[in-house]
Image (cartoon, rainbow, N blue to C red):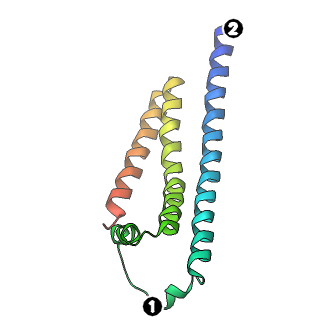
Amino acid sequence: MQAQSQQDQILHDLELRISKMLRSGVYVSGMLMTVGWLWGWFKNGDTLGSFTKYESRSLYETLNWAVITHDQPLIIGFAGLAVLVSLPIIRVFLTGVLFIKQKDYILAVMAFAVFVCLIASFFLGIEL
């Protein structure tokens, strides 16, 4: 009975660490996007002025242009967005790890299948 209680405590601690990591990720993402937006606002003035004409650009072109022109606010904003988008992927992966530790292999396989689908959808959906 003691071993089961200790195993439950270990799993509870792991779940708690996962939730704290996700919360911290949301805070970091929000901070990065806010800093990027405010920096761009102070640097360029009207941040919505560039939206007068729509130009379709790929993510690679946008980031490449930001690096060439040394547009740190845009790069920081995209970094915050990347952190925010990666959080659900990390959550699904860590859930699979948690299921393995619980020896629930069917749910672990399902979680990793969802993880692979998420990764594939990002690579199939990004137009570089």
For the point 58% across and 59% down, the residue is: 32
In this rendering, does residue 1 appear at all? no
* Closer to the camera in the image, 50 or 8: 50
Q: Looking at the image, is mark 2 or mark 1 earlier in the sequence?
A: 2
The answer to whether residue 105 is above or below residue 26 is above
* Lateral position of residue 124 relative to residue 66, left or right: left
Location of the N terminus (image quadrant): top right
Q: Nearer the viewer, mark 2 or mark 1?
A: 1
Q: Secondary structure at mark 2?
A: helix
Q: CA distance from mark 2 to mark 1?
A: 67 Å
For the point 33% across and 71% down, the residue is: 61
Circle 2 crowding by C-alpha within 10 Å: few under 14, some 14–19, many from 20: few
Residue denoted by label 1: 53
Mark 2 near mark 1, Cβ–Cβ under 8 Å? Answer: no
Q: What numbered label is drawn on residue 99?
A: none
* Lateral position of residue 29 relative to residue 69, left or right: right
* Closer to the camera in the image, 1 or 45: 45
Locate residue 86, reporting x and y percent: 49, 51
Locate residue 59, reporting x and y percent: 37, 68
In this rendering, does residue 49 appear at all? yes
The answer to whether residue 20 is above or below residue 58 is above
Residue denoted by label 2: 2
Q: Secondary structure at mark 1?
A: loop
Location of the C terminus (image quadrant): bottom left
For the point 51% across and 37% down, the residue is: 94
Q: Which residue reaches farthest top?
A: 2
At label 2, which amino acid type do we have?
Gln
* Closer to the camera in the image, 33 or 13: 33
Locate residue 77, reporting x and y percent: 53, 64
Locate residue 69, reporting x and y percent: 40, 73
Circle 1 crowding by C-alpha within 10 Å: few under 14, some 14–19, many from 20: few
At label 1, which amino acid type do we have?
Lys
